[in-house]
Amino acid sequence: MSERLDAFLTRAEALLARLEPLLPPVPAAVDWATTLACRWRRTALQGWLEPVRVLNCPPWERLRHLDAQKAALDRNTRQFVRGLPANNALLTGSRGCGKSSLVKALLPRYAKRGLRLIEVDKADLVDLPHIVERLIQERWRYLLFTDDLSFEADEPAYKPLKAALDGSVAGLPDNVLIYATSNRRHLMPEYFAENAAALHLGGEVRPGDSTEEKVSLSDRFGLLLTFYPFDQDAYLDIVAGWVEALGGRKTPALREEALQWSIQRGGRSGRTARQFAMDWVGRQGLEGKR
């Protein structure tokens, strides 16, 4: 019996020696004193927080013509970093108009007051309970940030997010908030046929169950901010600001070329303005005019 046991243990040790190099390494603990932002990464076997080494956070003052949205989100974040009650936030509206930039700009603005940012892909929201569990005992204030959030009806990440916002008996700890951006106001696709499920009782209209389900997710965000396309004057002002920030020169051709650029891109947005400014300043550099 002893010989058989020894043989089994020998084979088990050999098998483990072959498997060990294939296993992912144990992730190191995050030093939040020196790490301002992380991404949540996952494989089939585990998930971990990966520190972001190079931050992409625009300066707060560079985000122009968003005064109302900036004031509301800034106030909510100040409440949060001071340990006061604050709401989860959903930023919706036109693409490229500053939704994600506004969230990321909060990090350098409040990092010295203990704010930290964790970026979570939409597909990884199924791990939300595991992410939150790692943060409960920390002394920092965490924004869980999900960009371009939207769901199809059968996506598994929908329910964990809904429960975390306002539906689970556990809930979010006091040091965690969720900030999300989306081009969809209700986060899920809506179909014309769903209108047929509405009930008409006297003069009252009651939406059908599927419509109520879709609206209920966005309603669980306490702070809802809407972003709109910029008008021409605002767009040109944003262009001028970025050209100045990048060290470029303003010439009489700037206005016309910036407008042509927006027409080619199909709209006026902060993203379009920055992309044009980078092209403009870059061309000036090649021509030796900077």
Image: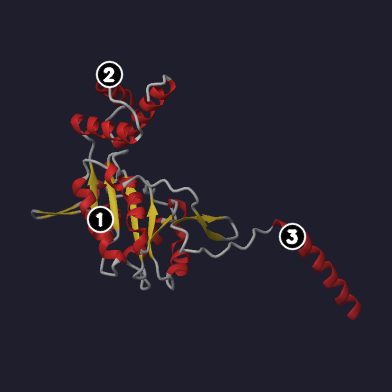
Q: Residue furthest bottom?
A: 1
Instruction: Give the structural element (helix, strand or loop) at label 3.
Output: helix
Residue pointed to by mark 1 = 74
Q: Position of residue 180 (x, y in %)?
A: 34, 52
Which residue is under mark 3? 19
The label nearer to you, 2 versus 3, is: 2
* Residue situated furthest left in the rendering: 203
In the rendered image, the quadrant that contains the C terminus is top left
Residue 1 appearing in the image: no
Foreground of the two, 49 or 146: 49
Circle 2 residue: 253
Res 141 quadrant in image: bottom left
- In this view, the residue in front, 124 or 104, is 104
Asked if residue 258 lies left or right of residue 54, the reply is left
Q: Are marks 1 and 2 in contact (CB under 8 Å)?
A: no
Q: CA distance from mark 1 to mark 2?
A: 36 Å
Q: Is residue 230 left or right of residue 151?
A: left
In terms of sequence position, does the residue under pointer 1 or pointer 2 come before the other? 1
Identify which residue is drawn at 37% across, 49% down: 149
Q: Nearer the viewer, mark 1 or mark 2?
A: 2
Q: Which quadrant, please, contains the N terminus? A: bottom right
Residue at 54% in and 56% down: 42
Dot 2 crowding, Cα within 10 Å, few <14, some 14–19, many 20+: few
Q: Is residue 24 above or below residue 66?
A: below
Residue 231 position in % (x across, y down): 19, 32
> Horizontal and vertical percent for residue 46?
57, 61
Q: Residues within 10 Å of mark 3 (few under 14, many from 20)?
A: few
- What is the CA distance from the residue labelled 3 to the residue labelled 1? 50 Å
| First in residue order: circle 2 vs circle 3 | 3
Kind of residue at badge 2: Ala
Q: Nearer the viewer, mark 3 or mark 1?
A: 1
